[in-house]
Image (cartoon, rainbow, N blue to C red):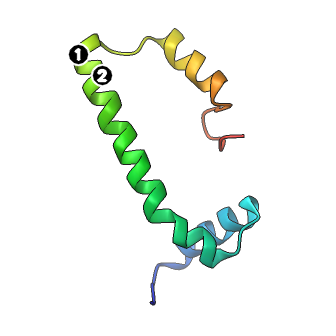
Amino acid sequence: MGISSDRESGDAVGASAAESGQPLSSFLAEAPASKAQAEALARFLEDWQAEHGALTPAEIAKAEQELSLRPGSPAG
């Protein structure tokens, strides 16, 4: 399989793979599953909020803390 991208995107993907400690091929092989999970979570949250109302800033902060997330930072 071959893929192509612009240099900036390729460099960013390569850096992300290196930061994760994975070979680039492994990092890329996991990308479709990661994207599918992210999309499923987005749909779930959209449906949940439609039924229960928008998440509050406190709920979002709690989730960020429990998931070790910070804006602009990867999960720990």
Which residue is depicted at the point 55% across and 71% down? 28
Q: Position of residue 53 (x, y in %)?
A: 29, 12
Task: Say which amino acid is labelled 2.
Answer: Trp
Q: Position of residue 9 (x, y in %)?
A: 53, 70
Where residue 43 sits, quadrant-wise, is top left
Where residue 69 sits, quadrant-wise, is top right
* In front of the other: 17 or 48: 48
Which residue, given by chain and number where applicable, does mark 2 sit on? 48
Within-10-Å neighbours for mark 2: few <14, some 14–19, many 20+: few
Which residue is depicted at the point 28% across and 11% down? 52
Q: Position of residue 73 (x, y in %)?
A: 66, 41
Mark 1 and mark 2 residues within 8 Å of each other at the beta carbon: yes
Q: Could you give the CA–CA distance between mark 1 and mark 2, rounded to whole angstroms?
A: 5 Å
55 in relation to 15, above or below: above
Which residue, given by chain and number where applicable, does mark 1 sit on? 51
Task: Give the total number of marks visible in the rendering.
Answer: 2
The numbered dot on residue 31 is none
Q: Is residue 12 left or right of residue 50?
A: right
Quadrant of image for the C terminus: top right
1 in relation to 28, above or below: below
Which residue is depicted at the point 59% across and 16% down? 62
Which residue is depicted at the point 45% across and 90% down? 2
Quadrant of image for the N terminus: bottom left
Q: Is residue 13 left or right of residue 50?
A: right
Label 2 sits on a secondary structure element that is: helix
58 in relation to 36, above or below: above
Task: Say which amino acid is labelled 1.
Answer: Glu
Q: Residue furthest bottom?
A: 1
